Image (tube, helix red, strand yellow):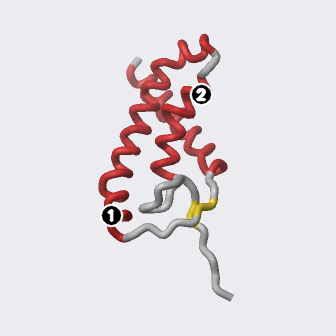
Amino acid sequence: MINNIKKTIIVLSALFMFALPTQAEEIEETPSAAAMVFDGLIVRPVTLVATAVGTVLWVATLPFSLLGGNAGDAADTLVLEPAAATFLRCLGCTKNGRKVEYEDD
């Protein structure tokens, strides 16, 4: 039983990870070295744990969310937002998205 729940969580997490890159926006930020270090050592591990915990909570509350008609909203809040903060944000940046690189002509 527990193995089935773990497999379900892994499969759902993988599906959400494939959906995330389509939501990225381009951002213009120039974070400092200190911001990058803080983000890499503190913020990213915390948001990764929040993604995992949110996924477990989402799966646990999924029957109730489906009955209430807000499973998508719950997934956005519990899984996608922390995952976007973890995986779709440049190191040290404050906004989710991909860093824009400009070339000087």
**Which residue is found at the position 44% from the left and 38% from the top?**
51
**Which residue is found at the position 37% from the left and 57% from the top?**
39
Label 1 vs 2, first from the N-terminus: 1
In front of the other: 11 or 28: 28
Quadrant in which the C terminus is drawn:
bottom right
**Which residue is found at the position 41% from the left and 17% from the top?**
1
Residue 36, quarter of picture: bottom left
**Which residue is found at the position 55% from the left and 30% from the top?**
75
Looking at the picture, how far across and down is residue 85, in whole percent? 48, 48
Where 85 falls versus 31 (above or below)?
Answer: above
Residue beneath disc 2: 73
Residue type for callout 1: Val
Residue beneath disc 1: 37
Q: Marks 1/2: CA distance?
A: 32 Å
Query: Circle 1: is it few (<14), some (14-19), or many (20+) Cα within 10 Å?
Result: few
Where 100 falls versus 86 (above or below)?
Answer: below
Q: Is residue 88 left or right of 91 when viewed as pictured?
A: right
Q: Secondary structure at mark 2?
A: helix
Q: Is residue 54 left or right of 105 when viewed as pictured?
A: left
Please tell me how many numbered marks the rendered image carries. 2
